[in-house]
Image (tube, helix red, strand yellow):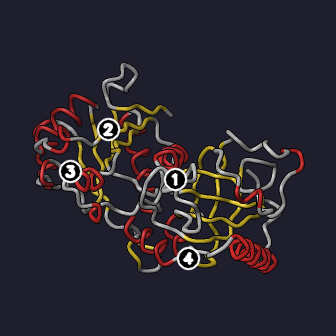
Amino acid sequence: MKIFRGFKHPEVAPACAVTIGNFDGVHRGHQAMLSLLRGEASQRSVPSCVLTFEPHPRDFFAALTKKPELAPARVGTLRDKLIDLSACGVDQIVVLPFDAHLANLSPQAFIDSVLRQGLGARYVLVGDDFRFGARRAGDYAMLDSAGLAQGFDVARMNSYEVHGLRVSSSAVRAALARGHMPDATRLLGHPYRISGHVVHGRKLGRSLGFKTLNQRFAHWKPAASGIFVVLVYGLSEKPLRGVANLGVRPSLDPKDVNGGRVLLETHCLDWPAALGAEGAYGKIVRVELLHKLHDERKYDSLDALTAGINQDCLDARAYFDAHPVPDSARL
């Protein structure tokens, strides 16, 4: 799979079958759409292509209007989106920077400059609520008419449902906001997960007896937050059991090196001796959030914080006693 920032790179395929969307949390509806896209691309002997945007269009307009409440809670980082799209078997991903120029393109200009001239679209697959162009003026009917006039096929995929619930990024966000991880798993088709490099922090956890893996969540508004029972992949042959804090850590000194940033801080219940004290830094790990224990809490002292972390570890061990990790679990 190839990934491009924009469509002007010389290795972007001259023709393709493409689907368009934000793909925040590549859920089961997205996965079904991408399977259909790959089949249609194969029939036309062209590569399959995902056209997506970064930042999320609503992030752009929230910043433009200085109304942060307009920005959606983010299910995943760009890294996780690209990993999940790659796992769906698409041939290329084009990430378009969503900026003022793109926001102001008329629907017809988007069709002409992006879909036709930029990507050479032979087939375009969209969702049932697809809108495009300045002020969201373009819809499926307009795209379909353009396809008939300009010689490319257009198709629309109806909603995908699981147990009567329409699968959407909004539904995933709602499940994560409630802390109901089984619902999120059903919608995503796998446990909710976050991947990234392990970075240095203040090492406060280590001084308290709870060494942590720190990962930055590259968005200020994560869809999930709180304390979670987790599995960590990427440090050993089998996943490591752990407990993690996703959020801004209200007990932390705001002058901390990571103060104000959203972090995923994970304490592994059983640290691999082979890694040593510093062996995880710089590695890319994937953390699966299995069960929410509680929201973030502000502790008034280091002793209270230590006691709180210790209780979270006990609760995580109790969860794993009731839900053992299968022997088949691997990287």
Q: Residue at x 52, y 68 (%)?
A: 225
Q: Check disc 2 and give the amino acid type.
A: Leu
What distance separates the C-alpha of mark 4 from that of mark 3? 31 Å
Determine which quarter of the picture holds residue 173: bottom left
Give whichever of 314, 154 is nearer the camera. 314
- Name the residue beneath numbered marker 1: 217
Quick one: label 3 or label 1, which is nearer the N terminus?
A: 3
Q: Relative to residue 301, is residue 238 drawn left or right?
A: right
Q: Which mark is residue 295?
A: 4
- Name the residue beneath numbered marker 2: 96
Give how far across and how far down residue 274 sits, in percent: 88, 45
Helix, strand, or loop for circle 3?
Answer: helix
Give whichever of 15, 267 is nearer the camera. 267
**Residues tagged 3 and 1 counted as in contact (Cβ below 8 A):** no
Quick one: label 2 or label 4, which is nearer the N terminus?
A: 2
What distance separates the C-alpha of mark 1 from that of mark 2? 21 Å
Give how far across and how far down residue 214 sits, in percent: 64, 52
- Name the residue beneath numbered marker 3: 64
Task: Name the outermost residue toward the right.
Answer: 273
Q: Check disc 1 and give the amino acid type.
A: Phe
Q: Residue at x 59, y 58 (%)?
A: 264
What distance separates the C-alpha of mark 4 from that of mark 1? 17 Å
Q: Is residue 100 above or below residue 259?
A: above
